[in-house]
Amino acid sequence: MTHHQPKIDTSPKVSDEIRKTTCYMCACRCGINVHLKGGKVSYIEGNRDHPVNKGVLCAKGSAGIMQVNAPSRLRAPLKRVGPRGSGEYEEISWDEALEMATDWLAPIREKHPEKLAFFTGRDQSQSFTSLWAQSFGTPNYAAHGGFCSVNMAAAGIYTMGGAFWEFGQPDWDHTKLFMIFGVAEDHDSNPIKMGIGKIKARGAKVIGVNPIRSGYNAVADDWVGITPGTDGLFILSLVHVLIKSGKIDLDYLSRFTNAPVLLNGDETSPEFGLFLRDDDGKPLVIDRNTGKLAAFDTPGIRPDLSATHRAAGVTHRPVMHHMAERYLDPQYAPEAVAERCGITPEKIHRIAAEIARVAFDEAITLDHEWTDFRGEKHATMTGRPVSFHAMRGISAHSNGFQTCRALHVLQILLGTVEVPGGFRFKPPYPKPVSAHPKPHCKVTPGAPLDGPHLGYAQGPDDLCLAEDGSAARIDKAYTWENPMSAHGLMHMVISNAHAGDPYKIDTLFMYMANMSWNSSMNTGGVIKMLTDKDENGDYVIPRIIYSDAYSSEMVAYADLILPDTTYLERHDCISLLDRPICEADAAADAIRWPVIEPDRDVRGFQSVLCDLGARLGLPAFTNADGGQKYADYADYITSHERRPGIGPLAGFRGAAGDEAGRGAPNPDQLDRYIENGGFFVNHIPEGANYYKPWNTAYQDWAVGMGIYDAPQPYIFDLYVEPLRKFQLAAEGHGERQPPDHLRERIKATLDPLPIWYPPFEDDHVDTAEFPVHALTQRPMAMYHSWGSQNAWLRQIHGHNPLYLPTKLWEKNGFADGDWARVTSAHGEITVPVAHMAALNENTIWTWNAIGKRKGAWALSEDAPEATKGFLLNHLIHELLPPKGDGLRWSNSDPVTGQAAWFDLRVKVEKTDAPTESQPAMKPLKSPVPQGPDHLEWKVGK
Amino acid sequence: MTTLPEKTTRKLGLVIDLDTCVGCHACVVSCKGWNTENYGAALSDQNPYGADPSGTFLNRVHSYEVQPLATSTMPHPAAQLVHFPKSCLHCEDAPCVTVCPTGASYKRVEDGIVLVNETDCIGCGLCAWACPYGARELDAAEGVMKKCTLCVDRIYNENLPEVDREPACVRTCPAGARHFGDFADPESNVSKLTAERGGMDLMPEQGTKPVNQYLPPRPKDQLDQPKPVGEIDILAPFLAPVMDEPKGFLGWLDKALEKI
Amino acid sequence: MHPAPSVIVFTTLSGLGFGLLVWLGLGMPAVTGWVAFAFFVIAYGLAVGGLLASTFHLGHPERAMKAFSQWRSSWLSREGVCAVAALLVMGLYAAALVFLDTRIAILGWLGALLSLGTVFTTSMIYAQLSTIPRWKTPLTPALLVSISLAGGALLAGQVTAALILLPVAGVIQVLWWVRGDGAFAASGTNMASATGLGTIGSVRAFEAPHTGTNYLLREMVHHVGRKHAQKLRAIALGLGFVLPVLMLLVPLTHAMALFAVLSHVAGIAASRWLFFAEAEHVVGLYYGKR
């Protein structure tokens, strides 16, 4: 019998054209090839040349075609005509919309600029939006970092001049042991998957520390199913064991960290615990060669980790002594912490031993000669191939800042930062705290703010306080409640504005922030605040302007909607001034550009701000003649200069387009980016690409690229002096004094060396009544709310069960298909449950932001997202429950103000299945029509 | 003719690494995107914004929880989670092909890819019944059987750069858990991986002789394994305390600094 | 498996129709003229009606002609060829009986063989599937053929044959059920072999690839409650076999005969519903539904 088969065309035409831009289906910012047929998007794949994703693309990115064509896209500016929350709108023209916004905002700027609160959610253009806010003159600006991962970012910057994700990455090509803490897809999603793939292909090891064994933790060779909120204790126990066995990198510590820096030991001094400094303000160490005091960066010295300095009857000891004293304490012994962490002492010992073995017995050496900042030449680069990564799981706790600090201290003790096989910074990091701006809040009516809003406070003088000591910012960032709130506190804006505390505002202006749904704690409460009226019948928050591309839950609560474009219809720059896409070996930035034109009456939000800024006469957006300075965002991207020669994009600068980093604006810059695949890369020369904070070759390269204006070498801050300054204030030193009720907390929690304390919620609720920890994780195939409208992705995650560990499952007699009532000190939800054995036995969890409000996102009202999906947010409050001291403490980290989402404690009971998840809210009236009832999506028929 | 070729020149297929797959569904959606736009009818979706969304996908990622058996040394082994992508395995003895009444399903003699010629498909669904793996889905809009084509319109496509001539799922996989190649060539990447890592057939007892191979997860939680009785814990020396020194830690520190 | 009405109607009716054709082909009863016409109308009505019903579950019924091409490898194709051949041959045979009052015996035997072959090929469509252990047994053709012959005998008024064949078919039915209940477990296909993860430990489906449904779940993952199934089995056995036999044992009237046939058809329909609904496809393992 012969075999017949049809002839098929194995070389069909793929598309008419490929346009290369940057993804925006999450914060990862991968390069994408957008295939077009007949001007329509036909396929999206990763860009192989792109530094972030090197060709790969996740589920969200691959589903971009459904996002760009989602029925939930807003179609024109909207003016509210019904009551807030009704969803009743009328479409208006852009002129009318912009006039309305101008009429609202101009009088505010003239008299009380602070009465505008401008918060920009998942904004990827913060250097631009912050410039707008600064030029407007309001101190009330931030993006969503405060409820996301500011603990991670701030702890990293304060400790070592950079953190994980966009700040740095493991040395994927050399690392031999990779340990992750609280990582579940959060950030840097494709690079981490690619990195794990590389490690696995080499047969190197991954250890996952997470109460939930899913995703990356599922592929980890060893799993540590830790009890939520105890990571810091576990890490400090590792530190204890490693110091005790001498498995720390003394050479590294002495050269590159403040371990040898002497601390003022005079208990009576107002500088007790601060660095001993020379006349130039440089921290002092003792030079082991001479035994004498020397500034830490003096050429030729060998800072001594051990020697002390005695003067005027007082012994000043180096940081290393203080660390040894603290961490050798038996309270950190594995046996002492094991039960609280939910890990056996043996396992802690074995993990510490494995870390020590790889770091010291498998050290690697690269033959790269380099010169350090003291002028000493090194023939080789030694690497300790243990690398770490951490994210929200350790960050979103009220002890998150100190926990993140503890992890960085562990990295540094092992000598694994900026060395081969360890953790490496990505430009513009490393960048010491001192090179960052400080926060600014000085308001002058009709004029810009006195400087950038957000920065790194280095002591009480940098707090954003009014004359009377009250908060200068509506979110109370940089106050004694959270002195180092480097990203602002977006999650507090609505509740503070509603309470008129510290003051009332006039207009709330938000962008890409679903505050009436998954981006708020206490969702129901926030909805009430947004719709609440005062005694005159006026809204307590008088005006709300909101910009979004989609019909999100937040749209229904705004008075004026400025519809944004989708990510393929807009200009953007992923800038070195902001949150760039650099790699450890290269500086890189990228653009988005309109690869398709909008088919609706929508405009990119940043272009709208250029227009609105000119209408309001904001100096940064107006020419000398009063005309509009930037025609649109694209114009801003190419022509704006932050400092002479430094603009939003580093590539193709100068008249000829051949300058990198520094150079005059180039009108053809965007075209050059487009020709280059939508991005720009400048590689760090070999020999400059490790030991960056101390490597003169790197420092010189960075100055050339415009990252710094002068070399900025620094040493890592195992001991964070600014924290000690806040403690000193709490102890009564200095002019600016904290309110009395905060003194003890500041003394206890703003410790300059990492500590661990139980999450605050444990102290405010009855842990016997609420014994269970409740967490959320972001699914890899879905990003926040955005995915739920995506016809392909919502088939993967259309609703979210609450996963229960075996112990709870069996104790309550649950079976598949059952529902549970979950109660916290704050609220109650009734939701479907499912069983998961690979889970910490006292932890329950669900996927984040799958649950949707009826009527939102152009879904039908009986969509599973609304009937079976749910939010855990209903159980969480921005304030902790009262504990009888007459105060309401905020549910956040006392250092940074980071929302403590993961401190949540609940109880779980089996209950009869309701008809739908509870609480069920009434449907919103959709401002857009519902989507079609079937799709056969072929563009090139 | 829906009889199977006696022998195929090449045996193209996938290696799927269960040790590495993080369960991100990238392959699922990339496949959906490519195959909606390309070979044959679009992969349709029904009720895409409604109560019961459902559509045709050629690749799906399952996940399984595996509970190792307790042993005397590990009385409470931790459960493990394994992500499990699954698409057509392009079997050598493909039952889906022989059951087809119209000849629409066939296995290509040159590379072993199992395909459906949609213009011949009557949509009877018998091939899907015959497939043990759930690799075939009848498209509700078009009424024809859809299945993984191993991106036959990519792997030989002269309109694509050579480096892109691989299935969309392989190209997009962020973790590199999917590998494409010729199993008939013992020197190919897929043959080597299969040999080195113990690649396995799914449902071997079904006699389908799948071409695609699954690499099993590597042994997990080795740090929980207490050392066998009588053996020295190889990690023990790494944690010998230095405090035995008469002067404690600081004494050690001083001495250690001398050696640097 | 999804108990699609089209497939249940098809197999029930066409089985009965081809069963009747077998008996008519053998000349039992030896009818001619209008009586023969009436018998053949019933037989063709059932057989062709069933075949037509079966096309309702096709995605592209207009391409049905293509299904005759693969008789060398496909049981479904063979069924189509066999059915058409049977209907053609029996058509000639019937024409001679009705219009010429002539029985061309060789045509009758050939037609009977082809009719029986049709039922057999139908049964082999199911019996060939390793993916459905409950069906993968010689008992499946035995069951479908015996039911077809028994039902045909009943319709053909072959009381003695029916009194023998109905109990035989009933016994095969019970055997088929008993074997079927253990078939999945005995097949050797399980979570361990489906995932290859059995060497690590016991395997449980965790998160499905999609939260909603899909073709596979709709078509191949159907769950029948145990109690419900037992009830239906009793009904199938009682109506399909026991009651018709009892009716044949009492003096037969036309009304009674009709009633026996209706009872049988109802019973077989129940049996056929169970045939599909209880059939566990191994793909369900991947969804943890086995």
Image (cartoon, grey):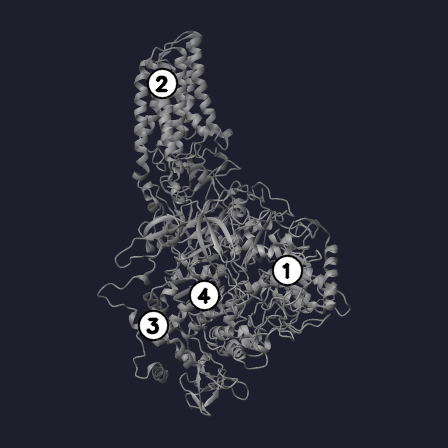
4 vs 1, front mark: 1
> Badge 4, how many Cα within 10 Å: few under 14, some, many 20+?
many
Label 4 element class: strand
**To which chain does the residue with label 3 belong?**
A
**Residue A895, image x, y percentages:** 52, 71
Q: Quadrant of the N terminus of chain A?
A: top left
Say whether residue A740 is left or right of residue C235: right
Same chain shared by disc 4 and disc 1: yes
Q: Amino acid at mark 2?
A: Pro
Q: Would you say C44 lies left or right of A592 here?
A: left
For label 2, the residue is C244
Q: Is residue B50 above or below residue A736?
A: above
**Amino acid type of the residue tagged 1 in the rendering:** Met
First in residue order: circle 1 vs circle 3? 3
Query: Given the image, on which type of amino acid does mark 3 rest?
Result: Asp
Secondary structure at badge 1 equals strand
Residue topped by disc 1: A510
> A493 and A667: which one is in front?
A493
The disc at residue A361 is: 3
